[in-house]
Amino acid sequence: MNLKYRFTLLKPQDQDPNLHYHHGLGLDLPKNFSWLDDTAVLALRSHYAGAQISNDQVVLVTDQMRSFPLYYLVDEESVAVSDNWQYLAELNNYEVDPAGFQQIAAAGFCFSDRTAYRNIRQVLPGTRIRIDLATGKVQKESLHVPLFESEKYLEQDDFLNALSQGFDTAMKRAVSLVGDSKILVPLSGGLDSRLIVCWLSENKIPNVHCFTYGRPDSAEVRISEAIAKNLGLAWTGVDLLEDKVKEAWNQSETADFLRYAFAGYSLPHVQDWYALKVLTEAGIANPGDVVFPGHTIVDNFHNHELLEEVPVNRKKLCSVLLHKHLLFNSRIDTSLGTKEAAKSTLDFLNFTDYNGSARSLQKTVEGYNFFERQCKYINNSMRAYEFFKLRWAIPMLDRDFTDIWCQGAIDLTITRRAYGEWISSWYNRLANTETQYHTGIAGKLPTPIVDFVRKVDEFTGVGKLINRVLAVPAALKHPLGFDMYRNHTSNNRLILNTLKGAPVHSHWADEFLSDSWHSELSLFQNQS
């Protein structure tokens, strides 16, 4: 079969020009490396992608967080592979895949290995793909993914000690590769980014700069500024002023960013974009600087009531998983996309060997959330860093952290309780002050009222309605400016979406898929 390939990030290696590799922080491959050597591949830990080309096959490999997407296209006569979705889409005349298109409309991303374009496939997290150049046959192998282990249970003291050591190892490895560049931390009012700045502060790492963005005088901005000050770290706040955001949005460069951040399978993750643009133009962020976001494996479980229903049958679990993600109130028919998503969900239960136990339930629910929304939409925020020529490191998705997390007992890992106590204690000791956290409206209600609503909700379902009503103000005037990224979506549409349970950014999908989100962006014209 005819082979076509083009790599943008992946570079041929001096030791073997048929060996292609990219590491986000510049770690070199060891000598005599092969992408077919499991031990050598897994020793790389995280933040990489690679390919290997020979006369008889093509090999594509991703790390467990799918740091850098890889794609392939196989037809009757040829095989094409790339780390650039646009290269394959051009070969295929940008022919839209109806199911993938509908899945973005319904969930914000394509399920399993589907993309928005016909016959173009994405390599899933922690996977090695082998494509036979004689037959076009595709073989898939799972190398390593962060799924909860059924036989290993670390209790609290051992768990937190091991987790702390794993985090320390991941941070030291990442920081050792930063060089003289600046470390940038998107600092929120929550737990995850606070864990990162606690480590940086305690270890007295130089050249650290935190930043927070939001509407002027928002609670999260105030809390984040205080955190940085208490830890002795530099901090910049980026005000989201609607006229300035709109002016920047309408620039031609933004269409280029959206095209890159789309990656062929996900609604572009735009919320960091404006802040990064401002920081870059101000000279605070410079090419080669390293962003340390708080993306994490923690808190991927949902529908906690399922734990009271063990064993949950496979049909119900599939339904729960789909309903968790197919939330967008789309204007188009998404029935085909939903049907195909259901098939891939059942395949995932087979992949995790779901057996109905509580641990298997946790493994499947959290694994599915990680494989789908985390690795496709959330982790696509890194495309914004790359667009501004920044590097990035995600220690809480590094194997040294996730391998320990997946050994924790269920009661320690099913919520943020133990994790939160660990971080709060660390921060309180370093800052010599009590912890403040940013919470939503529901988090500010008195505990007795929250408990009462939960009890009533068990019988009436009124809690869901209350949550949706409380979310309406944020949909209309979001603290992080989500409402600013729209061209023609009305306030009434935002309210309707929210009351139907759609996330506050679901209106982005309507405009993106109708090629109306930006005047210079057109990606979905070739629909059969």
Image: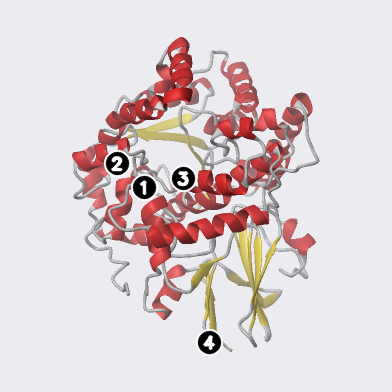
The reply to whether dot 2 and dot 1 touch (C-beta < 8 Å) is yes
Label 4: few (<14), some (14–19) or many (≥20) C-alpha neighbours in 10 Å = few
Residue closer to the observer: 25 or 498:
498
Which amino acid, by three-letter code, is at mark 3?
His
The nearer-to-camera label among 1 and 3 is: 3
- Amino acid tagged 1: Phe
Q: CA distance from mark 1 to mark 3?
A: 10 Å
Give whichever of 513, 161 is nearer the camera. Answer: 513
The amino acid sitting under disc 4 is Glu
Query: Sequence order check: which comes first, mark 4 or mark 1?
Result: 4
Q: Is residue 63 above or below residue 298?
A: below
Circles 4 and 1, Cβ within 8 Å, touching? The answer is no
The C terminus lies in quadrant: bottom left
Mark 2 and mark 4 lie on one chain; the one further toward the N terminus is 4
* Residue depicted at 19% across the width and 49% down the height: 488
Instruction: Decide if residue 384 is on the left or right side of residue 509.
Output: right
Q: Residue at x 35, y 29 (%)?
A: 465
Decide if residue 444 is in sight here.
Answer: yes
- The disc labelled 2 sits on which kind of residue? Asn
User: Which x, y percent locates residue 366?
Assistant: 60, 43
Tell me whether the residue at label 2 lies in contact with that at label 4, contact meaning CB atoms closer than 8 angstroms. Answer: no
Residue picked out by circle 1: 328
Q: Which residue is mark 4?
A: 76
Q: Which mark is residue 323?
A: 3
Q: Residue at x 75, y 29 (%)?
A: 161
Q: CA distance from mark 2 to mark 4?
A: 43 Å
